[in-house]
Amino acid sequence: MDILNNWAFVGIFAVMAPVFPALPIVIAWLLRPHKPNVLKSQTYECGVETVGDTWVQFRVQYYIYGLIFLVFDVEMVLLFPWAVAYNRLDLFAFAAGFLFIFLLADGLIYAWRKDVLAWK
Amino acid sequence: MDCPGLCEALANGGVNLGLAQFISLFIGVVLVSGVPLVTVIFLIWIERKVAARIQDRIGPNRVGPFGLLQTFADLIKLLIKEDITPTAADRLLYNAAPLVSFASVVLIWAIVPFTPYHYGVDLEIGALYFVAVASLGTLAIMTAGWASNNKYALLGAFRVVALLVSYEIPLVFALMVPVMLAGTMSMVDIIYAQSSMWFVFMSPLAMILFFISSQAETGRAPFDLIEAESELVAGFNIEYSGMKFGMFFAAEFLHVFTNGILLTILFFGGWLFPLWNEPLIAFAWLGLKASVLYFISLWIRNTVPRMRIDQVMWFNWFRLVPISILNLLAVAFLVKVMQELGLAPRDLAQATLGEVLPMTIILFLSNVAIAIGLLGQVRSVGRESRLATETAQTATAVGD
Amino acid sequence: MEFNFITVAFIVFSLITLGGAIGVVTCINLFRGTIWLMVSLFGVAGLMVLLSAEFLAAVQVLVYIGAIAILFTFAVMLTRSITSDKMRFTRVWVNVISAGILFVLFALGVIYPVWVANAATHFPVTDAGLATTTDLGVALVSGSQFVLPFEVAGLLLTAAMIGAIVIARDADDEGN
């Protein structure tokens, strides 16, 4: 089967891809000095000492970007088959894709109006 | 599964069929992945040399002829540098992040067609595979920032991830234009669809959008908030040292060239050479076009100042995203109308130059129209803001 | 079951999926839990490839690992210092019973169609008759097939976006 043959290649590639960067790191691990001490292993070594916890609460702004991106991502995934089939579509089917993109643009315009996309 | 070429020879030679398939695939993987791995060594040299020349310096010139061996010297340095893992870091994720980051770029090369006959795989969903694999890099950056347990790193990672996901939207919409014109997501078929006309002439706007957003995806100037040295120290990779830092670095260098080659495939006709398709010439032609685009990317990187994060975000959400949607709609609409009128061919791979010419001209003009409208709008916004500032200044001057 | 490349791949992807899932439920740290979830979903993408559903597999990686993972980490960082707290569930019995019921339901869902006589049709995965992405695209927008669900999905996504903006804006205003 051709598809599985292709994907077997991708599968082996995916296994090998992290090995390439791992190799020099392992070689470096063999060659380099290992002399950690308490001061050297501090967070932000040789800078200002950190105060408090790093993993604190972040602003909701990031979450909004993430969510809008997710919505766009899902819509784009649904649009890809439409784009691939584009040359074979009749006018009705083509208009259906257009309507879909307009709905997406609607959401974007709403986000503009509510001014959530500007970085504050 | 098929078993052609080397695999067949091995199987005939008495090797187990499954093993023969595995060996032939494995050799293929090593050959294909060897290209980016060898390229990246020279890319670092080119990058430094170009940056130096633009800044009126000489650049690396001591190690080897023209400093060509500088990268190897750097490599040796990185290998013998002590690699510090902070005690507070999440060790597992901290070590995994650079691997995923580099792998996500190398994985893209699986679908890059080097010549008509030499490529890793020709996936039916090639374009989607590229987007999916590239998005792994974003997760790697997030993981690196979080696992470092450093405030600068986490803040840098958060900012940059917000930036990367935002710029992925125009990237994918721009990518959809060649996919739509070619009617396929396979990289090889996208190239063949350009046999009579490059897609860059049909939709220059999509090419520019793809170029800008891929520049942002690599975290290069003017979008280099990834390592805004003066603001975030070094961003997500501040706690990394030695070879692990080197891997993030190499991934970035490779990513820039990978974008150049993808741009060539999607918009500049890949390896299609006008007269003859000898593999070697095809490969050189592809490499030449990719190198020119790569050089333009370096040129921009070294001459344009960094934008502020709010400007970067504004530029994306209020300019790139709407333009990319508008461009997609315009191209889709015009091509469909022309197809219905019989002015545009339905299969570009079989079409002659005469058949695609009317379609190309109309699409090109529509793109120019969008661009002119956009520039006019930018101009009026700029004038308004300038007038507002001037009025405010006069008011204060009078007040004094 | 014959032992070949596909079988090995199936076993590996199943182990990745299950291992990731176990990682999710045993991890106290929420961020690590997210990463484990992505490992598990990556395994599922591999299983989809084995079923020749390559489009779905790419979508799985793109949407889940590319977008949902990012969203989850942003969401995790929204919750105040939850990532460092050692959270413990106190009502063990409720969890055990509900998990048990869910497991039985899902297991039935998997076993039922295979064992009941009528549904036990075996679908061999072959290239012939395999739907391509083009077929999917045509089916999604052609009037006689799935155009209504397609547009409803678009509407739903727009609604999701607007809802998210409204809720997040309220939260933001209260925060300030």
Image (spheres, coloured by chain):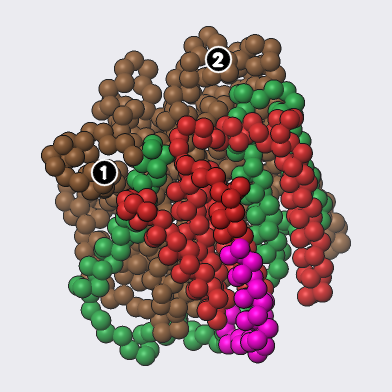
Chain colours: A green, B brown, C red
Examine the structure image and report whether residue C93 is included in the region drawn in magenta. Answer: yes
Mark 2 neighbour class, 10 Å CA radius: few under 14, some 14 to 19, many 20 or more: some
- Res. A69 in view: yes
Q: Label 1 is placed on what type of residue?
A: Gln
Q: Label 2 is placed on what type of residue?
A: Val
Q: Give the range drawn in magenta.
A: C79-108
Q: Which of the image's four quarters has the C terminus of chain B?
A: bottom right
Q: Quadrant of residue B88?
A: bottom left
Mark 1 neighbour class, 10 Å CA radius: few under 14, some 14 to 19, many 20 or more: many
Residue B21's disc is 1
**Number of numbered discs on residues:** 2
Q: Judging from the image, what secondary structure is the residue with disc 2 in? A: helix
Give me the residue at 45% from left, 28% from top: B189
The numbered mark, 2 or 1, whose residue comes first in the sequence reads 1
Q: In front: B12, or B209?
A: B12
Instruction: Residue B262: give x, y in percent of width and height.
Output: 44, 38
Give me the residue at 18% from left, 55% from top: B63
